[in-house]
């Protein structure tokens, strides 16, 4: 039962790790999943672009890449997040940056729990789950 955070820049540390861990454990419980080992890697735009190219054959920036290593109901994985990309997106869409960081954090967990966002119906369901679980964070 481990949730670890790694930052390629000190400026990416924008939240209370213990509170986020507590939140993720709560969400996993609601999803009826057990926590194995989850690593969050907060990296720059160029690093996430390179990961996207090497592992997914995509040649574009993204805010998150999730590598699923789950086993049955035990959630394991590596989640790469680009705060720079989140910042760019939140500025373009006039959204609160910190809220969007939290949204992306829980988005990765939703993928590890088996939720998809490949089509419009799935995207709506994913957004609903993100909003639902963001409200849990506000209560902690």
Image (cartoon, rainbow, N blue to C red):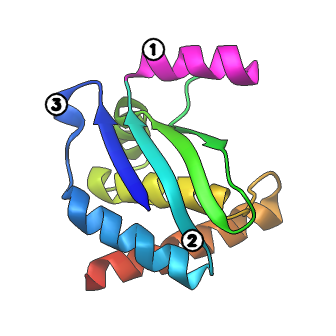
Disc 3, SS: helix
Front: mark 2 or 1: 2
Q: In which quarter of the image is the N terminus?
A: bottom left
Q: Do the residues labelled 1 and 3 touch (CB within 8 Å)?
A: no
Residue at screen point 45% across, 14% down: 46
Q: In which quarter of the image is residue 115?
A: bottom right
N-terminal label among 2 and 1? 2
Front: mark 2 or 3: 2
Q: Can residue 100 be seen at all in this image of the molecule?
A: no
Mark seen at residue 34: 2
Q: Say if the magenta span includes residue 56.
A: yes
Q: Is most of the magenta stretch helix, strand or loop?
A: helix
Magenta highlight range: 44-59
Residue at screen point 60% across, 60% down: 75
Q: Quadrant of the C terminus?
A: bottom left
Residue 106, position in %: x, y? 48, 61
The residue that mark 1 highlights is 46
Residue 29, position in %: x, y? 52, 81
Q: Nearer the viewer, residue 125 or 76?
A: 76
The residue that mark 3 highlights is 10
Give how far apart the Cα atoms at labels 2 and 1 are.
33 Å
N-terminal label among 2 and 3? 3
- In-image side of 132 versus 120 (left or right): left
In this view, 113 is above or below 77: below
């Amino acid at each position: 039962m481990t949730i670890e955070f790694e930052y390629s820049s000190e400026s990416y540390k924008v939240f209370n790790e213990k509170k986020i861990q507590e939140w993720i454990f709560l969400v996993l419980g609601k999803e009826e999943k057990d926590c194995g080992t989850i690593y969050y890697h907060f990296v720059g735009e160029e690093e996430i672009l390179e990961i996207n190219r090497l592992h997914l054959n995509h040649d574009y920036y993204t805010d998150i890449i999730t590598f699923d290593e789950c086993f049955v109901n035990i959630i394991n994985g590596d989640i790469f997040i680009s705060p720079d990309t989140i910042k760019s997106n939140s500025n373009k869409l006039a959204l609160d940056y910190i809220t969007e960081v939290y949204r992306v954090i829980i988005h990765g967990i939703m993928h590890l729990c088996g939720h998809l966002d490949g089509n419009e119906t799935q995207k709506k369901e994913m957004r609903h789950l993100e909003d639902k679980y963001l409200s849990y964070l506000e209560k902690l």
